[in-house]
Image (spheres, rainbow, N blue to C red):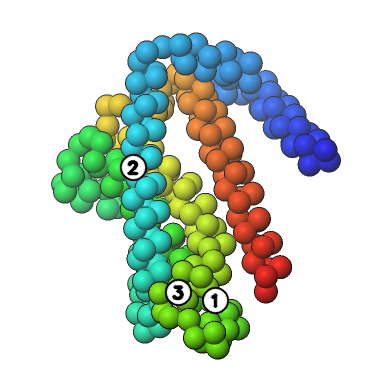
Amino acid sequence: MRRAFDVVLLLAAIVALWQALHELAPIALSSPHETVAKLARMSQSERFRGHLAETGQAFALALAISTAGGVVFGVTLGLNRLGAQVADPILVSIYSLPKVTLYPVILLVFGLGMSAKVAFGALHGIIPIALFSMNAVRNVAPVYLKTARVLRLGYGESFRTVIVPAALPEIVSGVRIGFSLTLLGVLIGEMFASQRGLGFLLMNAIGRHDVETMMAVILLLATFATIANALLLWIDRRLHVRAAEAL
C-alpha cells in the first residue's frame, strides 16, 4: 500500500509539474488534459493505428533479434575466458560509438522500410545485452562451479543447471537495458528514413509544430516504456533476491 501511495504521489507530482510548465510555455507544451484528449482522438483513427502497428512490429522483431543474438553471443564469449578478455574492450568501444553515424550504412545495406528500422533497433540493443550476458557468465560464483565438479556433472548439465540459473539475473538486467535502447533505435530509424510509424509521426509533427500530436505520441511512448521497464525491473529484482538467497 505504501508503494502504491508513492507511485500515485509521484504521478500527481509529474502531472502538476507538467501543468505548471504548460502555464509557463503554452506554445511549447500542451496541457495534460489536452494531450490525453488528443491521444484518445488519435487512437480512434485507422491511420494512427496503422502507424502504431508498424512501430510495434518493427520493435518486436528488433527486440527478438537483439535479445537472442546478444544472449547467445555474450554467453558464448563468457564461457571462453580468452575470447571474453579480447571482446570486452572491443564491445565497449562499439557501444560508446554514436549509432546514428552508422545509419547511412544501414540504409545502404537494407534500404528504406521495415528492414532498416529493425536492423537499426537491433544494433542499439544487441551490444549491451551481449556485454551483460558475457559478464554474467564470467562472474558466476566459483563455489557453484566447484560444487558442479564435486558432483561430477557433465559440461552440458553444468551449463543447464548451474551456469544459466546463476547468470540469469544479470542477463535479465542486460535485457532491460537493451529493451529501452532497442525502442530508441527503432524510433530514430523511423524519424530519419521512414514514411510510417510513431517516429515518422513525431518527426512530421515537429516539422508542422503540431504540439498536441508531439505530446500525445511522447505520452504514449513514455507510458509504454515505463510500464514495460517496471515489469522487467520487478523480474530483475526477484531474480537477484533469489540468487542472493541461494548464495
Measured as percent of width and height from the top left, residue 29 is found at: 57, 23
- Residue 140 marker: 1
User: Residue tagged by mark 2?
Assistant: 61
**Please, what secondary structure does the residue beneath circle 3 have?**
helix
Image quarter of the C terminus = bottom right
Q: How packed is label 3: few (under 14 Cα within 10 Å), some, or many (20 or more)?
A: few
Q: Amino acid at mark 3?
A: Glu
Identify the residue shown where x is 43% and y is 81%.
154
**Mark 3 or mark 2: which is in front?**
3
Is label 2 in a helix, a strand or a loop?
Answer: helix
Q: Which residue is mark 3?
A: 157
- Asked whether the viewer can see residue 203, the reply is no
**Mark 1 and mark 2 residues within 8 Å of each other at the beta carbon:** no
* For discs 1 and 2, the disc positioned in front in the rendered view: 1
Q: Residue at x 51, y 70 (%)?
A: 161
Q: Is residue 180 above or below residue 41?
A: below
Rounded to the nearest angstrom, the CA distance separating label 3 from label 2 is 31 Å
Number of numbered tags placed on the structure image: 3
Is residue 165 positioned above or below 203 on the image?
below
